Image (cartoon, rainbow, N blue to C red):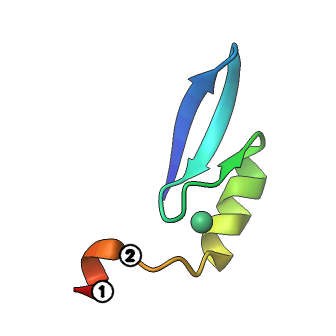
Amino acid sequence: MVAQTQRDNQTWYRCEECGLLFDDRGDAKQHETNCDAEDPSYIQ
Ligand SMILES: [Zn+2]
């Protein structure tokens, strides 16, 4: 899912799957939909 975080007085949106940061929630959401990062707890 997408996590909202504050940095440098700006709101960022982080993909919790791979850690990528976005400054636009729409971009983060779209990335999340296409994110193919493996869930670490799912591998083992
Ligand atoms: Zn991702």
**SS for callout 1:** helix
Locate the C terminus and report the quarter of the image it occupies. bottom left
Tell me, for residue 24, which label it has, or none: none
Distance of mark 2 from mark 1, alpha carbons?
A: 7 Å
Name the residue located 70 percent from the left edge and 66 percent from the top edge.
31
**Vertical side of 40 occupied by 6: above or below:** above
Residue placed furthest toward the top: 9
Amino acid carrying mark 2 in the image = Asp
Q: Position of residue 18 (x, y in %)?
A: 54, 63
Picture quadrant of ligand 1: bottom right
Dot 1 surroundings within 10 Å: few (below 14), some, or many (20 or more)? few
Q: In this rendering, is residue 29 above or below 22?
A: below
Q: Is mark 1 within 8 Å of ligand 1?
A: no
Q: Which of the two residues, 20 or 12, is positioned nearer the viewer here?
A: 20
Q: Would residue 27 be found to the left or right of residue 11 on screen?
A: right
How many numbered marks, from 0 up?
Answer: 2
Residue at the far left in the pictured view: 44
Quarter holding residue 8: top right
- Contact (Cβ within 8 Å) of mark 2 with mark 1: yes
Say whether residue 43 is left or right of residue 37: left
Q: Quadrant of residue 35?
A: bottom right
Residue 13 in the image, given as x and y percentages of width and height: 63, 43
Q: Secondary structure at mark 2?
A: loop
Query: Mark 1 — residue?
Result: 43
Q: Residue at x 69, y 13 (%)?
A: 9
Crowdedness near tag 2: few (<14), some (14–19) or many (≥20) residues, C-alpha within 10 Å:
few
Q: Residue at x 66, y 59 (%)?
A: 29
Residue type (three-letter) at the residue carrying disc 1: Ile
The residue beneath circle 2 is 39
Q: Residue at x 67, y 78 (%)?
A: 34
Q: Looking at the image, which is closer to me, 24 or 18?
A: 18
